[in-house]
Image (cartoon, rainbow, N blue to C red):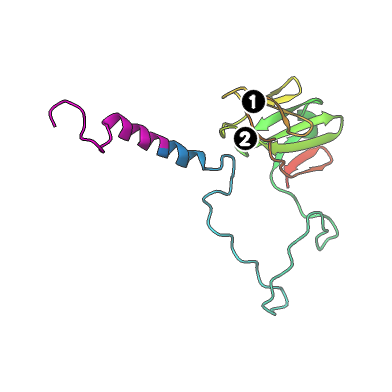
């Protein structure tokens, strides 16, 4: 080939590179951002029942009392109720959760992973949970999109509020 045009039917270097880049972008676009379970191994089978019958034990229902009559403890404490401002919230980056208090005594929790491109939301201000990457904003009351390019609301996360303690459920 002598510096001229490629042979008919052969792509140019530019076309080959662009095609490869588009294929890579398409593959990356198929990944599901914010899915904490993606790539995880299949879950373990349920444990056998305590009676030794080999039948799976029924799953523990949330809020069902333990042997002592009290509910089993929830996950690690995130905050005290007084740490979450009314009409605002707080982002817990390590746990990938944001806790809000839309009204006095009402606490909600959502994934802290933006539904646009998987960035971590960084702050709660002005009644919205805000993503610094592309400006998406989500309402503290229900996680719905208040503005920006995010296509879906923030997924809810389960929390347990007892007394003045907020824990992951």
Instruction: Give the class, few, some or many, for how many residues have Cα within 10 Å of label 1's Cα (few <14, many ≥20).
Output: many
> Which residue appears at 83% of the width and 61% of the height?
68
The x and y percentages for residue 114 are 62, 33
Residue most toward the bottom? 53
12 falls in the magenta region = yes
**Mark 2 surroundings within 10 Å by alpha-carbon count, few (fewer than 14), some (14 through 19), many (20 or more):** many
Quarter of the image where one finds residue 2: top left
Q: Between marks 1 and 2, how big is the CA–CA gap? A: 9 Å
Please, which residue is most extreme toward the front here?
8
Q: Which residues are magenta?
A: 1-22
Residue at x 67%, y 31% (from the top left corner): 91
Percent across and percent down for residue 30 are 51, 42
Name the residue nearer the viewer: 52 or 2. Answer: 2
Q: Nearer the viewer, residue 29 or 15?
A: 15
Pointer 2: what residue?
115
Q: Name the residue located 64 percent from the left edge and 33 percent from the top edge.
A: 151
**Residue 32 drawn above or below residue 89:** below
Left/right placement of residue 68 relative to residue 46 reads right
In x, y percent, where is residue 125?
72, 21
Q: Residue furthest top?
A: 126
Q: Pick the residue in front: 106 or 83.
A: 106
Q: Which numbered disc flags the more N-terminal residue, 1 or 2?
A: 2
Q: For this view, does 67 lie left or right of residue 37? A: right
- Give the residue pinned by disc 1: 136
> Do the numbered discs 1 and 2 sit on residues whose CB atoms are within 8 Å?
yes
């Amino acid at each position: 080939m002598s510096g001229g045009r490629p042979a008919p039917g052969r792509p140019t270097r530019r076309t080959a590179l662009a095609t490869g880049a588009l294929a890579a972008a398409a593959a990356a676009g198929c990944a599901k951002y914010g899915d904490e379970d993606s790539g995880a191994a299949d879950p373990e089978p349920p444990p056998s029942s305590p009676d030794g019958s080999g039948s799976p034990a029924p799953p523990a229902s949330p809020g069902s009392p333990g042997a002592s009559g009290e509910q089993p403890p929830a996950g690690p404490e995130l905050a005290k109720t007084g740490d979450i401002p009314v009409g605002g919230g707080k982002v817990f980056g390590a746990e990938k959760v944001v806790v809000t208090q839309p009204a006095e005594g009402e606490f909600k929790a959502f994934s802290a992973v933006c539904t646009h491109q998987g960035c971590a939301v960084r702050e709660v201000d002005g009644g919205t949970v805000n993503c610094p990457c592309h400006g998406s904003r989500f309402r503290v009351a229900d996680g719905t999109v208040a503005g920006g390019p995010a296509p879906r609301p923030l997924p809810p996360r389960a929390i347990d509020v007892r007394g003045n303690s907020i824990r992951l459920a």
